[in-house]
Amino acid sequence: MRRIDAMAIIAEVADASNALIVCNLGYPSRELFSVRDRPENFYMLGSMGLASSIALGLSLALPERVIAIDGDGAVLMNLGTLATIASFAPPNYLLVILDNRVYGSTGCQPTCTSRCTDLAAVARGAGVRDVKVVSDEEELRMSLSGSGVVVAIVDPGNADVPVIPLSPEEILKRFMERVSPRMRRS
Amino acid sequence: MFNICPGELVYRGLKRAGINLVASVPCVNLKELLCLLSSDPAIIHMPVTREEEGIGVCAGAYMGGRSPAIAMQNSGLGNSINALASLNMLYGIPLLMVISHRGTQGERLVGQIPMGRLTEPLLKTMGIKFFRPRPHEAEETVEAAWSIALNEKRPVAVLLDIKFWEGR
């Protein structure tokens, strides 16, 4: 499965279920933008490793479904997030790790998942109850209705897609404008 | 001079500011504050594994309409610098940071000294405003710091040194 095809499936399911997306920086965000841009997509431009954490904060603030799209390299940078996700376990939260076994945006240097690290086992060990591993498009589509963590095995390599033509302020503003009517009054 | 412990004064400031989600990594000085946060049903208290993770959680909470703060030791500022710069400062996401400032006068642990000395210079270099209230100013300062963060869409720090936690 190519990552951009996985991205298209996640975006399609998110759109159909009105879910918010927080997407890892670099090519993953560029691919998501090119397959299905929507204001409910938050594209990260920095702070590698924090997609799952930003999405976790969102999922506790809002009743809406939130999907974090992250990579193996980024999750390895913030492994503690899996323990925090397990301990809060919001039912409206799903972390999809697109594991291509490399740092794709920096020239495909291998990550530890290319040798021996099993992120699904790490997530289970951290206490996440619902962990799935998928390797084709149909399995991926089926896995997206749940909560917890999905590890989707994808091919290394980036699609030839342009840089996102939005400023950081624009990305945040349109996301929050779309989200604000749904905000819980507390 | 005060019957109320310094941690409770900080808690009252957070309540006055309307803070309703707090990510935290513990420091012994934050002990009372963290207990108060955990027992307040109006506040989501999220213990996290590392301060940088908390910066991400708080950013997401703000995007979802919450008023977030992080409570941590100044060592955690060092763990958070890239996130503060390339998330909060890049997008314009406000954050209140309540920081126990170790390595200040009265510190007993040598390991706290380097970050103790670097805390103010790091904040200055990053252009992050910070305040150093005495205990009797804490409520007001915490409230004002959040209001600046919100208006300027930036992180703001409240530094609470060893003297502060001794009630001085």
Image (cartoon, coloured by chain):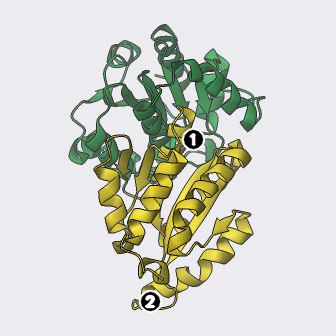
Chain colours: A green, B yellow
Which residue is at the front of the view, A142 or B14?
B14
In the rendering, which numbered label is found on residue B119?
none
Work out whether A36 lies above or below A81: above
Would residue B72 be seen by someone viewing this image from the given angle? yes
* Residue A125 image offset from top left, x and y in percent: 22, 47
Residue at mark 2: B107
Observer-side mark, 2 or 1, equals 2
Q: How many numbered dots are placed on residues in this image? A: 2
Work out whether A66 lies above or below B86: above
* Residue A36 image offset from top left, x and y in percent: 62, 15
Quarter placement of the C terminus of chain A: top left
Q: Residue at x 57, y 41 (%)?
A: A104
Q: Residue furthest top?
A: A16
Residue at mark 1: A104
* Residue A165 image offset from top left, x and y in percent: 78, 28
Which residue is at the front of the view, A150 or B131?
B131
Which residue is at the front of the view, B28 or A17?
B28
How far separated are the C-alphas under marks 2 and 1? 45 Å
Q: Amino acid at mark 1?
A: Gly
The crowd level at tag 2 (other Cα within 10 Å; few <14, some 14-19, many 20+) is some
- Disc 1 is attached to a residue of which chain? A
Q: Amino acid at mark 2?
A: Glu
**What secondary structure is marked by label 1?**
helix
- The quadrant holding residue A82 is top left
Q: Residue at x 63, y 47 (%)?
A: B94
